[in-house]
Amino acid sequence: MPVLVACFKWVVDEAYIRRTSAGELDLSSVSYKISDYDRNALEEAARMKEASGGSVLAVTVGVPESTKGVKDALSRGADQAFFIADPSFGMLGASETAAILAEVIRTRIGNFDLVLCGEGSSDLYNQQVGIRLAERLGIPCLSFVQKLELEEGRVVAERRLEDGIERVSAPLPAVVTVLPDINIPRIPGVKDTLSASRKPVVTIGKDDLAVAPDAHFRTISLAASRLDRQCERFGADETDIRRFIGALRQKGVLR
Amino acid sequence: MAGIWIFAEKTEQALELLQAGQLLLAAGMGGELIAVTWPGGPRPEDLGAAGAAEVLLLPPLADHQPLESYGPSILEEARKVQPNLLLFSSTARGKDLASRIAEGLNAGLCSGCNALHWNSESGTLEMERLLYGGAAVQRIAPFTFPVLATVPPGTFRRGTGNPDREATIRHLPAPPVSPVSVLEHKPKERKGQDVMAAKIVVCAGRGFEKPEDLAFARNLADTLGGALACTRPLSEEMHWLPEDLCIGLSGIQVKPDLYIGIGVSGQVQHLTGIRGAKIVCAINRDEQAPIFAAADLGIVGDLYAVLPRLLQALNETAAP
Ligand SMILES: Cc1cc2nc3c(=O)[nH]c(=O)nc-3n(C[C@H](O)[C@H](O)[C@H](O)COP(=O)(O)OP(=O)(O)OC[C@H]3O[C@@H](n4cnc5c(N)ncnc54)[C@H](O)[C@@H]3O)c2cc1C
Ligand SMILES: Nc1ncnc2c1ncn2[C@@H]1O[C@H](COP(=O)(O)O)[C@@H](O)[C@H]1O
């Protein structure tokens, strides 16, 4: 029965990010969410378990305030969570996150079959952690996967690449990074949320870790993107549509 | 100083990276430009003409081995030579290889890098990327070299090249056999025009109810002499259009004179791909849709009512 590990991140919901008049990032009214594609990773793990038994372990590295995310992940079908928390884990680089995940997966879980990651995190979108994690663990990685199956000690996956679809197979244990169209993540119901609070959570602090990875980059600046557009509005009636076409011609973008 | 390495799946991507590398060297970063390729990859003569002083040529892969199997060979050589910077074109395989090699070198990798600047005074490499789906721009500098970057195709201009220039070729050893095997490759049919080169881009979003209805958008694109593109849900969730037509953070970045988004909400990840458009237009029935704040001209209305009227008015008023 497969042991499935799903890695998820609790992130700022970017839709609520504003720009101050000084051009700074305004995070004052943001809410948080499980990184979009990590919901697909959790869902895929839950479906595999539902199909073939086994267990789903959800793992996250984050700040101590991410407890809501841990509960959210448990309400999506995971049996147990590993929550590696420290106030300094808010803006880790991809290599640091991978190093921490690798240590916890190796030392606390040990016997696992498949690690599922999202294709990229919604906030950093480094698209690195899953692949780096596999390198650290010394196991194969199948990235950008849109379809996944377990077969007799192997994982068979469809990777989506620029020039077509590549069907690949690798021995377990392995890491996969999943694309959003691999499944449609469930929306947890009240029952799921209730049962989530009874599931075990292993909390791991920075001092419990042997690795202390260093950052590779320093930030020189971080600013909100600018959007300088004219924001002229038109209605949908014929007169307005003619005015709209006129405006485009005047701007010289239409013949 | 041991120079800059580049790796790309396609020749045009390699030319872009070589040009970016040349600018950095000219700015004083030092070292030589070196391209890594393999039989079936960009041709050594093209890489040489575009400025590579040396080409590291990998041997052919054994049957059923994915391109990423080259990772250990490239890593071994990079460990020995210690280049300052390794640039990868950010295709799926490029991103995968870059991550593996970065991990092997214990080096930083700037993903989706869209600007590179060598600050000769402080000796720092300044790299720019987007955060939060494009809502923020971050400038970073590596603490140590080597450092890696993946560069979205189309970020930098291609160099002109000089056919008289020739690179010296050095052969790299074959990689060990990868545990991953390719069972099947289903190539994608390439069709349609190049959205990245189009002057006018008509982009369909989830506001379209059925795939047949995309005919309206296609019609508009044809009438305007433009290309049809889409948002990620249309290519990736519904599979109504091929993925290479998806505009945005995880798709392509376009810089047309005119972009018209139809039934597109304007989430930041999508807007990231149209930053370079001269004029942005939107058609959406929800006046609160974020795309209106990111558009020069917006029509608030139902696309099923607006598009027929727009097409008719365009045909009536077409310049002779
Ligand atoms: C890491 C990451 C990367 C991503 N990368 C990309 C990317 O590269 N490209 C991309 O596009 N997305 C990307 N996304 C997804 C992005 O966040 C949005 O989900 C997506 O862009 C929304 O697509 P949409 O506007 O077509 O759909 P929706 O958000 O569903 O919007 C549909 C719009 O149509 C309007 N509408 C509905 N019916 C009508 C009608 N009859 N007439 C007129 N208007 C109508 C609605 O008002 C709505 O505004 C990414 C997300 C993540 C997390
Ligand atoms: N802090 C984290 N905790 C757990 N998993 C993570 C974390 N950061 C990234 N991941 C996983 O790695 C994937 C890729 O992240 P990234 O490299 O940041 O784009 C995500 O989709 C997650 O599955």
Image (cartoon, helix red, strand yellow):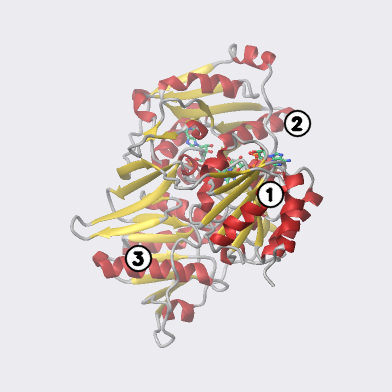
Crowding near the residue tagged with mark 3, few <14, some 14–19, many ≥20 C-alpha atoms within 10 Å:
many
Distance from disc 2 to disc 1, alpha carbons, whole Å, reads: 58 Å
Observer-side mark, 2 or 1, equals 1
Q: Residue at x 51, y 39 (%)?
A: A121
Query: Mark 1 highlights which residue?
Result: A239
- Is ligand 2 less than 8 Å from the beta carbon at label 3? no
Q: Nearer the viewer, mark 1 or mark 3?
A: 1
Against A195, residue B234 (above or below) is below
Residue nearest the observer in this picture, A140 or A79:
A79
Q: Mark 2 touching mark 1, by CB under 8 A?
A: no
Gap in angstroms between the C-alphas marked 1 and 3 = 57 Å
Q: With B125 as the anchor, is B207 left or right in this view?
A: right
Can the viewer see residue B218 in this picture? no
Q: Amino acid at mark 2?
A: Ala
Q: Is residue A106 above or below residue B51?
A: above
Considering every residue shown, the one lying at the far right of the view is B212
Q: Could you tell me which secondary element the residue under label 1 belongs to? A: helix
Do residues under tags 1 and 3 come within 8 Å of each other at their CB atoms?
A: no
Read off the residue under disc 2: A51
Figure disc tally: 3
x 52%, y 72%: residue: B11
Q: Residue B117: image x %, image y %?
A: 31, 58
The three-letter amino acid code for the residue at tag 1 is Thr
In the rendered image, residue A85, in percent from the top left (x then y), is placed at 41, 24
Amino acid type, callout 3: Ile
Q: Residue furthest left?
A: B121
The label shown at residue B4 is 3
Q: Ligand 1 falls in which quarter?
A: top right
Mark 1 residue crowding within 10 angstroms, few (<14) / some (14–19) / many (20+): few
In terms of sequence position, does the residue under pointer 2 or pointer 1 come before the other? 2
